[in-house]
């Protein structure tokens, strides 16, 4: 499932995939894969992304059913 909330939060901070990747210590391809739903990040990576984007885990990664 695509993570449009992550993509939207990244865009709201005016960050490219590469810039976010650099800030959290992963490759641009990893950020792209997370946004496309092709990669399930570790909790540590999720927390790092949330800190950079000023969001909570629930706001970016929790799927509501």
Image: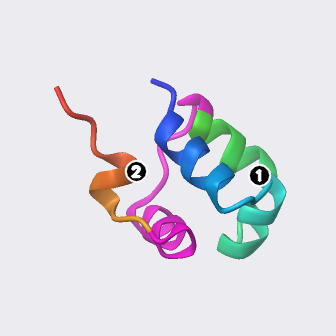
Residue situated in front as seen by the camera: 40 or 4: 4
Q: How is the image coloured?
A: rainbow
Against 36, residue 8 (above or below) is: below
Q: Which residues are magenta?
A: 36-54
Horizontal side of residue 12 vs 16, given as left or right: left
Q: Which mark is residue 60?
A: 2
The residue shown at (16%, 26%) is 65
The total number of labels drawn is 2
Horizontal side of residue 30 vs 61, given as left or right: right
How much space separates mark 1 and mark 2, taking CA atoms? 15 Å
Counting from the top left corner in percent of width and height, residue 35 is at: 60, 38
Counting from the top left corner in percent of width and height, residue 60 is at: 40, 51
Taking the magenta stretch, the answer to whether it contains residue 39 is: yes
The residue shown at (47%, 41%) is 5
Q: Secondary structure at mark 2?
A: helix
Contact, mark 1 vs mark 2 (Cβ under 8 Å): no
Horizontal side of residue 64 vs 42, given as left or right: left
Q: Which mark is residue 17?
A: 1
Quadrant of the rendering where the N terminus is positioned: top left
Counting from the top left corner in percent of width and height, residue 3 is at: 50, 35
């Amino acid at each position: 499932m695509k993570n449009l909330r992550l993509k939207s939060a990244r865009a709201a901070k005016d960050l490219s995939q590469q810039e976010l990747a650099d800030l959290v210590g992963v490759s641009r391809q990893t950020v792209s894969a997370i946004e496309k739903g092709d990669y399930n990040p570790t909790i540590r990576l999720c927390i790092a992304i949330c800190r950079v984007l000023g969001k909570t885990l629930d706001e970016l990664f929790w799927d509501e059913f």
